[in-house]
Image: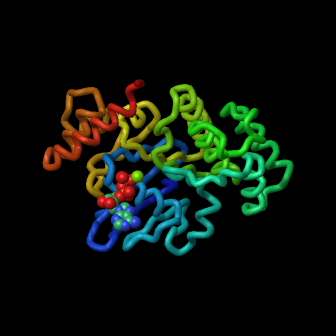
Amino acid sequence: MVLNIIEINNLYKRYGNTIALNGINLSIAGGQIYGILGPNGSGKTTLLKIIAGILPASSGDIMVDEISVSRNADNIKSMIGYIPETPALYESLTPIEYFNFLASVFKIDDNILRDRVNAFSNALEIGKYLDEFIGSLSFGTKQKVAIIGSLIHDPKIIVMDEGMNGLDPKSSKIIKELLKDMTKKGKTVIFSTHIMEIAENVCDTISILYNGNIAGTGNLDQLKNEAGSSNNDLEGIFLKLTGDEDLDNLLDSLRESIKSTTPP
Ligand code: ADP
Ligand code: MG
């Protein structure tokens, strides 16, 4: 029997009158890169924050490795590395100082910390920035620092909100390879994006989130079948699965995704 690392049951989130998640059910098998794809406002960030134990659900529950998130948020935090959409890093620290700070929070031994920082900063090619102020680093380098920070306690699950946005092609390729390596070691990566090309290139399984509902789940072939689409690209599948009720919104978001994936 394959144990799902994450089980989401009938999950609702309301902000006042806004229903951000409208009864989500998802089973996520471990050891893969799992993508949550949806336009802006579809509920991706809300879903990822609830999975990471940062935001309470209105109702329903999430089990992470058979532990209920709502009842054990603290245990969950040590299992999950969360990379927010806009990481809030301490600009006046250097990456090394930041990693030391995290190591003290997670009680990581000095030698283990040094090995992990060396391995990750080599893999992400940021060794030469480790003693510079974070505030002086480029967007891509900051993002890499945030990623290393989220991996420093060796979490089983990596939750990344819009992780590849705005990265140069080389950085995003390096990060993609790192995430793939992690899944080979049995880790699970959950990844949100509104950019189809990223979902298509990076994810083993994709769930399409639309207006707080899951419109379809599977690999590209399964989604294609579900959409009854002979069309090979995710964009066509996305449009079929979500229907055309809100086409203007959807097209705006597609245009934005095309803008952000096309080099200037
Ligand atoms: P996404 O990440 O897909 O853009 P979000 O999860 O950020 O979607 O938002 C889903 C919906 O919930 C949107 O309608 C958004 O306006 C609303 N929302 C998100 N956060 C809040 C909040 N703190 N207060 C009120 N409404 C919110
Ligand atoms: Mg978001």
In the foreground, 7 or 244: 244
Please state the horizontal and vertical placement of residue 182, each as a whole percent of the image: 61, 40
In the foreground, 263 or 192: 263
Residue 11 position (above or below residue 168): below
Please state the horizontal and vertical placement of residue 96, each as a whole percent of the image: 77, 47
| Left or right: where 219 falls relative to 65 | left
Q: Residue furthest right?
A: 111
Residue at 45% x, 37% y is 203
Q: Quadrant of ligand 1?
A: bottom left
Please state the horizontal and vertical placement of residue 68, each as a whole percent of the image: 51, 69
Residue at 37% x, 73% y is 59
Residue at 49% x, 64% y is 63
Residue 231 occupies quadrant: top left
Residue at 36% x, 43% y is 194
Q: Quadrant of the C terminus?
A: top left
In the foreground, 213 or 63: 213
Please state the horizontal and vertical placement of residue 71, each as a whole percent of the image: 53, 75
Q: Is residue 2 in view?
A: no
Residue 171 position (above or below residue 39): above
